[in-house]
Amino acid sequence: MNWVNKHKLLAIETIKHNGQLCLELNNLWQALHSSFNIVQYCYINENVLNEIRLFVSTSWEQFLEKEFASAIVKCNNTLAPGSNKLSWRYLKCILKNKLHLRNIIKITNTYIEVRY
């Protein structure tokens, strides 16, 4: 079983500053520091924040087991959804167990309920 697959670079590794990739924390710090210094004294129109109230927040329906399982089945087995490199294939195997699937649904629906 191959646990190591090719993965896209993390966001920290794809940020460029002065034409160079920020592959080390120090490079990332320099990019953020210089960006902050450039905009530090720029005028900010705070009235833009007033427009946020005009948007209606979206309410989410809770997930059903069948919906969740059918969505997972459509995912490519070789891709990893997060930085932990756990591929969809392994998640699909875990979710074949009904108890695990129900627990994942409970966790997901709790996030929706508390609007996390």
Image (spheres, helix red, strand yellow):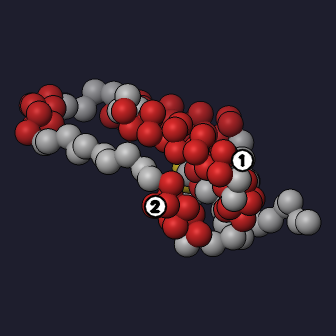
Q: Secondary structure at mark 1?
A: loop
Q: Residue at x 72, y 65 (%)?
A: 89
Indicate whether 112 appears above or below 6.
above
Q: Residue at x 11, y 33 (%)?
A: 53
Mark 1 belongs to which amino acid?
Asn
Q: Is residue 4 left or right of residue 50?
A: right
Q: Residues within 10 Å of mark 1 (few under 14, many from 20)?
A: few
- The residue nearer to you, when weighing 78 against 26, is 78
Residue at numbered disc 1? 84
Q: Quadrant of the N terminus?
A: bottom right
Label 2 vs 1, first from the N-terminus: 2
Q: Is residue 41 left or right of residue 46?
A: right
Q: Quadrant of the C terminus?
A: top left
Residue at numbered disc 2? 67
The reply to whether residue 50 is visible in this rendering is yes
Mark 2 belongs to which amino acid?
Glu
Measured Cα–Cα span from mark 2 to mark 1: 24 Å
Looking at the image, the residue that sits furthest to the front is 98
- The residue nearer to you, when weighing 93 against 14, is 93
